[in-house]
Amino acid sequence: MTSSSPIRVMTPEEIAVNAGARAAPVKVPEPGLFAGRAMRLRQLAEGHAMRDYLLFMAELSQAQHERFKRPDAVALPAEVLVNSAMVGGLPPLDVATFPRDAAWRDELGALLGAMGRSAIPDPARALVKQLGEADDDWLEHQADALLAGGAPGLEPAAAPLIAAALQVHWARLVVRLQQRYDDSDQGEHVAPFGMIDDPTVCPCCGSRPVASITRIAAEQSGQRFLACALCGAQWHYVRIKCTHCQGTKGITFQSLIDADGKTSEAVAAECCETCGHYLKQVHMEKDLQVEPLADDLASLTLDLLVGEQGLVRQGFNPLLILGEPDAPPPDPGGH
């Protein structure tokens, strides 16, 4: 069951008065990205109908953390290409144009090895073994389909493991590119990440958000950030504004209500009557432990109920692909 409520949109003058200090518009992935996600998934799994899946994802996220903290080098774009992207208002590590290094398959192999050594159900173990024996061409085709937002030919069962490897690879790219800039003579180099022409996609890799998060820390208090489904970066986005059509009219919020009539306040779906799309929001002021991707996975019921109202999901969670392998992809949000 869901509850809904209309939202009064502030005028530009009210927004200006209440704006306060602004945090950096783009937050690159933090070292504890995957470890924090694993912790949240384990917390959410307690008593959850999807307990086994959430625990499997927690184990996978922990394996991602172990890989992500390694000081592995990656091939970064030349400075001239970063500058060209910034001038053009494009993400410098755009999944659609940046050459994908085969190193991502090394991440996959390491994750499969870690999962194979962990205590996982037999069907999951069989999938891990199958993926470990897959040929490179098939894996690259799956990566293409996944990064396209769920194109035909994507194998739903294999997608979460492949996505996990791609997440580690792109998060590493973003962090290393930012480090290169931080270690340089910044006066003679271009900052790699900033707001781009399309505010509805990640300014680092061009992927769609998995959800948004409202923060409470210092200058970020009350501010909303979209969370990238792939690289884990977050970027500022105005509150109560559709992440598909960027409109501010006809915005309502849908939340789950439990059997006792209590509304879940930490996670809500921001719904746009104008374009018929929605994206979830997680609120730190309601639960300090919220994590966009983890809380999105654990609130699948909200997607199903909102979807029954004819709304289309704008966000994308690569760790849970629904549908048949050759089914048409969902509406990619106009991108």
Image (cartoon, grey):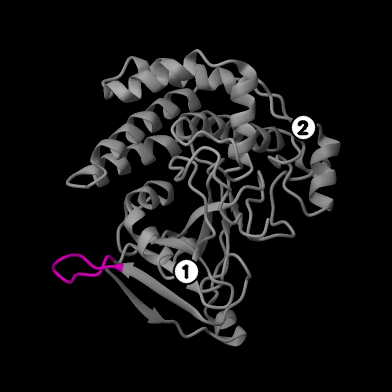
Q: Quadrant of the N terminus?
A: bottom left
Mark 1, residues whose alpha carbon is within 10 Å: few (<14), some, or many (≥20)? Answer: few
Query: Does 89 appear in magenta?
Result: no
Do we see residue 282 in this rendering? yes
In front: 144, or 174? 144
Which residue is drawn at the image coordinates 36% and 35% (left, top)? 57
Q: Which residue is mark 2?
A: 77
Which residue is drawn at the image coordinates 43% and 47% (left, top)? 293
**In this picture, residue 294 sits left or right of residue 243:** left
Query: Residue 171 appears at what percent x and percent y?
Result: 57, 35
Task: Give the label, 1 or 2, closer to the camera.
Answer: 1
In front: 11, or 167? 167
Secondary structure at badge 1 equals loop
Query: Residue 83 appears at what percent x and percent y?
Result: 83, 44
In front: 275, or 110? 275
Do we see residue 283 in this rendering? no
**In this picture, residue 289 sits left or right of residue 179:** left
Q: Tell me the amino acid under the disc marked 1.
A: Gly
**In this picture, residue 195 sits left or right of residue 305:** right
How far, Cα to Cα, is label 1 from label 2?
A: 41 Å
Q: Quadrant of residue 54?
A: top left
What secondary structure do most residues of the magenta stretch adopt? loop
Mark 2, residues whose alpha carbon is within 10 Å: few (<14), some, or many (≥20)? Answer: some
Q: Which residue is mark 1?
A: 310
Q: Which residues are magenta?
A: 256-264
Query: Residue 292 appears at what percent x and percent y?
Result: 42, 51
Q: How many callouts does the rendering have?
A: 2
Which residue is drawn at the image coordinates 60% and 65% (left, top)? 244
Classify 235 as above or below 238. Answer: above
Q: Quadrant of residue 198?
A: bottom right
